[in-house]
Amino acid sequence: MQLLIRTLFVFVFCISGFTALFASDSSIRPVSRFPKDFFTSVKKLDIRFHQADHKVNKGEVVKICSCQILNLQSKNYHQNDMGVFAERSSQGQLSSDLSITKKFIDREKKHLRLLFYDKLKVVNSFSEPTDCKSLYLKLKLINSSLVIYDILDADVRK
């Protein structure tokens, strides 16, 4: 169903784009007659389709995702807005699951600090009862310069 809706949307987009380009009577055609935030609205629509596919049914495993946005700096490299994500299947105790995902992120930050970067600063933290891909897409709409470092699997015992 989702593929059909996307295909129809792309088809309508192409038809309206071609008619807007070729129906112009001036010799210099405008590059685009679409609103400036058109592509942002398409991204939001795609995220809504993705979230609609992941609605929780009874007996289904719920994913919990925690994220920390970092600014990293070494002697010869500087990276802003690096996202470290940790995902866990919920065991029914939300606070316990969130603390486990936070521990995984803290362990990864420790490795980053010891091995690669001199300075590491936490800019923001997020936790939601969703999978990390959906959370990343949601945060990417807010901050287009966000780069994903890794999605850590917090279900693995170490």
Image (cartoon, rainbow, N blue to C red):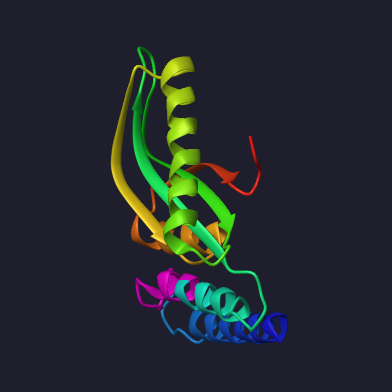
Position in image of residue 144 (x %, y %): 39, 53
33 left or right of 2 in image = left
Q: Is residue 28 visible?
A: no
Snapshot quadrant of residue 80: top left
Is 79 inside the magenta-drawn segment? no
Along the line of sight, the residue nearer the viewer: 68 or 92: 92
Q: In which quarter of the image is the C terminus?
A: top right
Q: In this view, does 89 lie above or below 151?
A: below
* Figure disc tally: 0
Q: Can residue 156 be seen in this view?
A: yes
- The relative height of residue 10 versus residue 111 in the rendered view (above or below) is below
Q: Is 79 placed left or right of 15 in the picture? A: left
Q: Quadrant of the N terminus?
A: bottom right
Residue at left offset 49%, top offset 48%: 101
The range drawn in magenta is 29-43
Q: Which residue is drawn at 64% across and 80% down?
A: 6
Q: In this view, does 34 lie above or below 64?
A: below
Q: Residue at x 36, y 77 (%)?
A: 35
Q: In this view, does 153 lie to the left or right of 37?
A: right
Picture coordinates of residue 125 (x, y %)? Answer: 33, 50
Q: Where is residue 127 in the image (x, y as percent from the top left)?
A: 40, 58
Principal SS element in the magenta part?
Answer: loop
Q: Residue 86, position in %: x, y? A: 52, 48
Nearest to the observer: residue 10 or residue 19: 10
